[in-house]
Amino acid sequence: MSERVVKPVGRGFLFLDSHPDGCARLVRELAGQVERRTPERRVALVIGSSSGYGLAATIAGLARYGIDGVGVSFEKAPTARRTATAGWYRTAETAALAEELGCEFHFVNADAFADTTKDEVLKLIAGRFGGVDHLIYSVAAPRRVDPRTEETYQSAIKAIGAPHTTKSLAFDGADPVLQEVGIEVATDDEIAQTVKVMGGEDWSRWVEALTERGLTKPGFSTVALTYIGSELTGPIYRQGSIGAAKADLEQTALTLSKDGIQAMTSVNGAAVTQASSAIPGIGLYVSLLHKVLGDGLRTPIQQSIALWDQLTGDTPLDLDEEGRIRLDRWELTDDVQAAVRAQWEAATQDNIAEVADAAWFFSEVRRLYGFDVPGVDYDAETEVDVAWP
């Protein structure tokens, strides 16, 4: 037993500890937003199942369609000094949820890029399920070690072609700070390394490993989650080094779509995630988007419900001309983008707290670590030594 009071200690958008009770309650909160369906049971493999859209896709699949399968993520256990990562606690609660729903869903804590992880996961799938119906790939990592070359690749958040300056949101304590952030130009090597980390190579290797072992069931489909976003964030995201990786991901989908495999990318809308909060300008943009849309901003769990409805055939696939599933149409309408742009251009340090939903954004970041979750007593001791399921 290792109980203690856990407080949100950190700097900016990064916190050193996570709250186990808050993370667990957040999982239940998300599951409570999902209406149950009872179709034919599916088996799914979710790569990146502990956070962001991968977590939402896992919970939505479990709570809506009762999926069986395996989730893969890479989280840190609690230590004598620090709590476990938030994804560790979320996974423990997701496993409890799956059991209550009568689902057989296993969770593997390992580096998704490693061939040893693929071997472990595929042996588990072969032994327990005989194959999978769906593979959802949702990996956001700063670096990748290629197990076949042992070379380490590092992703870069940089512009392509010309340097760029963007408005960006930061926090001094709980007070929002509007900054001007300069974005350097990526070298060809930095672009190539970013593609190696965030592009489609590892997704392709997962699909190839499944097909080589005969573990894709008839009608198998696979989706990698991606983002396009606004012209306001384009220079740092879609037209930047990250965008080059996303373009590679989309090209990979076209390459994988053969021999009975349906491979697609799913373009999700903007959201507050641990990965997106680290990108300059994204925090401000999402804060403004929420100010404009309020409850009209579709959350990751709402979008994941729509994704599962389409993957199962409950609703038709909403594809664009390039064959991508579009879950972001609500974000990119002309009227929404015009309103967000007007707020963006009007934002100053003096009015940032009113022009943007900065307080909401900061609270959402804290919720990623299990804080600011209603119903949790943050002054009480809590058990931090939670076992991996």
Image (cartoon, rainbow, N blue to C red):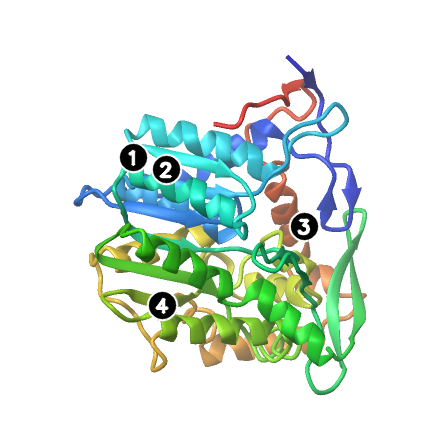
Element on which disc 2 rests:
helix
Residue at the spot of label 2: 124
Residue beneath the point at 46% across and 54% down: 299
> Where does the image place residue 47, in percent across and percent down from the top left?
46, 50
Residue 138 in sight in this render: yes
In the figure, residue 245 lies in which quadrant? bottom right
**Which amino acid, by three-letter code, is at mark 1?**
Arg
Q: Are marks 2 and 1 in contact (CB under 8 Å)?
A: yes
| Mark 2 → mark 4, Cα distance in angstroms | 25 Å
> Where does the image place residue 360, in percent across and percent down from the top left?
62, 51
Element on which disc 3 rests:
helix
Query: In the rendered image of this protein, does residue 336 appear above or below residue 116?
Result: below
Element on which disc 1 rests:
helix
| Category of crowding for the residue at label 3, using alpha-carbon neighbours closer than 10 angstroms: few (below 14), some (14–19), many (at least 20) | many
**Which amino acid, by three-letter code, is at mark 2?**
Leu
Residue at the spot of label 1: 128
**Which amino acid, by three-letter code, is at mark 4?**
Met
Residue beneath the point at 28% across and 71% down: 258
Q: Are marks 4 and 1 in contact (CB under 8 Å)?
A: no
| Category of crowding for the residue at label 2, using alpha-carbon neighbours closer than 10 angstroms: few (below 14), some (14–19), many (at least 20) | some
**335 sits to left or right of 239:** left
> Where does the image place residue 110, in percent across and percent down from the top left?
54, 41
**62 sits to left or right of 291:** left
Give the mark nearest the N terminus, 3 or 2: 2
Give the mark nearest the N terminus, 2 or 4: 2
In the figure, residue 97 lies in which quadrant? top left
